[in-house]
Amino acid sequence: MEDYIQFSAKTKSEAITKACIELGVSSDQLEIQVISEGSNGFFGIGSKPAVIKVRKIEPVSEEEEMKEIVETVKLDSFKEEAPVQEEKKTEAIKPVKKEIKEPKAVSEKPRQPKPVKERAAKEKQPREFREPKEKQVREKTAKPAKPVEILTDPEEIKEVENRAKVFLLDVFASMNLGEVEITSEYNTTDGSLEVDFEGEDMGILIGKRGQTLDSLQYLTSLVVNKGKSNYIRVKLDTEDYRKRRKETLENLARGIAYKVRKTRKPVILEPMNPYERRIIHSALQGNKFVETVSEGEEPYRHVVVKLKRN
């Protein structure tokens, strides 16, 4: 037997593919041992590669192959016989079931319509009131952001900025990002802390559709607001991603509106976070021909663009 050879990649399947290419065999000709499944980390941070050990399987002799074929033929013949017996049993039982069901259906007919109507009526009522309830929830979640007190003490502002910088630098160091320049500014208009950073591998921090950046922003907000009586909104950005993403979504909204008007069919967009959904809603708010609604539950809540009813 050959010795095991170790391979690593982002995922287990990628590692197996890598091994097959290097050894020039298919996966069914390899004996595979998984050392590590790999992980995506926490919010994309601290991810670990998948690691496997493989070696080629020794070729099977003709005699052993014939034995396997004979065994499989025996198993197949046994499996074919078994269903016939089961079918006979079920056929004998079927008429008995029909005889039992018929009298029950007759006796229950006058009783069934009433509860069904009552249930249908009860189910319709909460559905009609779901939208107002959702609006109330949105209003409640938006309320804490309104009574924000603007910080005026320079020392307190510096302390808040340092909290954010220290936390972010620790995260970047654990990700081995190298040198990252962080600049922060406290906005005295809305009481928010705007943090921007520059470096070589900022695409890693942005992530797919900004998911990593949003997660990092949420964690930074927790650190900054810990022990604070007044809420401070934290905004993270890099390489003008927020601005570029906003422009992309606005262009997408206009393109979808044109498509809906032309085809006269609604279009369902991919799931988005509340901030991005608001961009779509506001972009088409003044449109004369289409309207937008949010449907579904988080994290799969999405925007639907459809024709207005005239």
Image (spheres, rainbow, N blue to C red):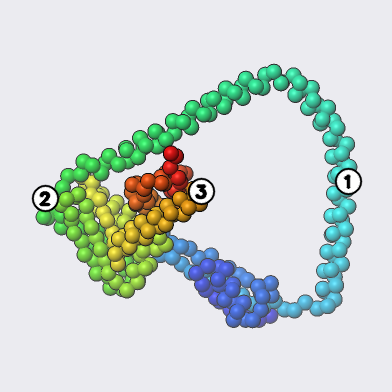
Residue receiving disc 3? 265
Residue at disc 2, secondary structure: loop
Mark 1 and 3 residues: CB-CB less than 8 Å, in contact? no
Say if 99 sits above or below 297 in the image.
above
**Residue type, label 2:** Thr
Does residue 16 appear to the left or right of 139 in the view shown? right
Image coordinates of residue 212 in percent, x first then y, are 38, 60
Residue in the image at 88% along x and 46% along y: 85
Image coordinates of residue 69 in percent, x first then y, are 84, 68
Q: Nearer the viewer, mark 2 or mark 3?
A: 3
Residue at disc 1, secondary structure: helix
Is the residue marked by circle 3 packed among few (<14), some (14-19), or many (20+) residues within 10 Å? few
Q: Residue 152 carries which label?
A: 2
Image coordinates of residue 42 in percent, x first then y, are 41, 59
Does residue 96 appear to the left or right of 301 in the view shown? right
**Residue type, label 3:** Lys
Say if 20 sits above or below 115 in the image.
below
